[in-house]
Amino acid sequence: MFVPVEGGDLAVETHDGDTAPVLAIHGVSGTRKLWNWVAAHNVTLITPDLRGRGDSASVPGSSVRQHADDMLRVLDALELSSATVCGMSMGGYVAVDLAVRHPDRVSELVLVDGGLPMLLHSQLTPETVQADVDSQKPAHERTWTVDEHLAAQAKANSLIDVTDPLIREYYAADLTDDGHLRLSLETSAADATDVFFGTSRWQELTVPTWLVHAEWSIGPDSPPAYTVEDAADYQSKLTVLREPVLIKGVDHAGTVMTHPGAAIVAEVLRQAQK
């Protein structure tokens, strides 16, 4: 379905399951296909393509607050007065903004390797973020086959399982019919800047919140987004934060893009709704 928002229409997919509805918000370079692994665990999901991505790539403008406003429109379109909200990576920051400004619309909040400030972000500057975006331009200017795109991703991260059909479906959704990447670099750069250097209101959260975090960031043995100590520190500072859940043996993407990671996220969503 397509949901009208400021500037265009957001593509939204739903997955039927045996839970209460979960609004699932993907990360900075993802699409709604990110949640297919969690959907496989019979979780009822509402999965939008955020503006500038996937089938919402033509919708202009971006910021964490704008995405959160878009998510309100999605809930309204589906006539949901409230829902469990789950955000992964940047989607976690969108989910936090939504929960802080509209706590009546968020019954439970599940953050997957995102949403709370990361130590890694303190090492970044606007210049390094822009340099990273500039480095992606050649990939956006060329055309790709699905096999080429998948091979490039697997080369960058040895944990990607190229034999998993859901992996192929996920990366196929990145491409237009003529083989270009369906991601606005301008939008992703604006979102990354907002996440890294904007002001988060996480300390104002009042809804029951869960944090699920990965053992690594990108690839085996890489420094994680949140250490066990980081997670414990957040729990001590945020009274609504339940016991954090560590997923061992996966990196940032593997929290939801692997079957073991998705199984744990799905179980946390079920526990949150009890």
Image (cartoon, helix red, strand yellow):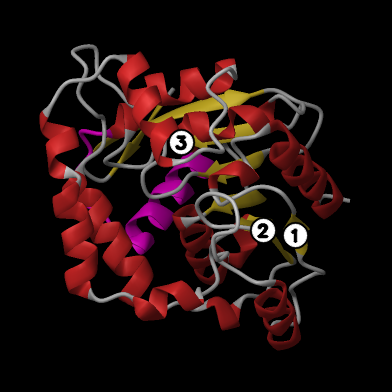
Whole-percent x, y for residue 29 in the image: 36, 44
Q: Which mark is residue 215?
A: 2
Label 1: which secondary element: strand
How many circles with numbers are drawn on the protein?
3
Label 3: which secondary element: strand
Whole-percent x, y for residue 65 in the image: 37, 63
Assign the magenta stretch its main secondary structure: helix
Residue depth check, mark 3 versus mark 1: number of the one nearer the observer: 1
Give the amino acid at mark 2: Glu
Q: Nearer the viewer, residue 271 or 27?
A: 27
Instruction: Identify the mark nearer the N-term, 2 or 1.
Output: 2
- Mark 2–mark 1 CB contact (< 8 Å): yes
Q: Which mark is residue 48?
A: 3
Q: Which mark is residue 123?
A: none
Which residue is at a point 24% across and 64% down the rendered structure image? Answer: 129
Magenta segment: 57-76
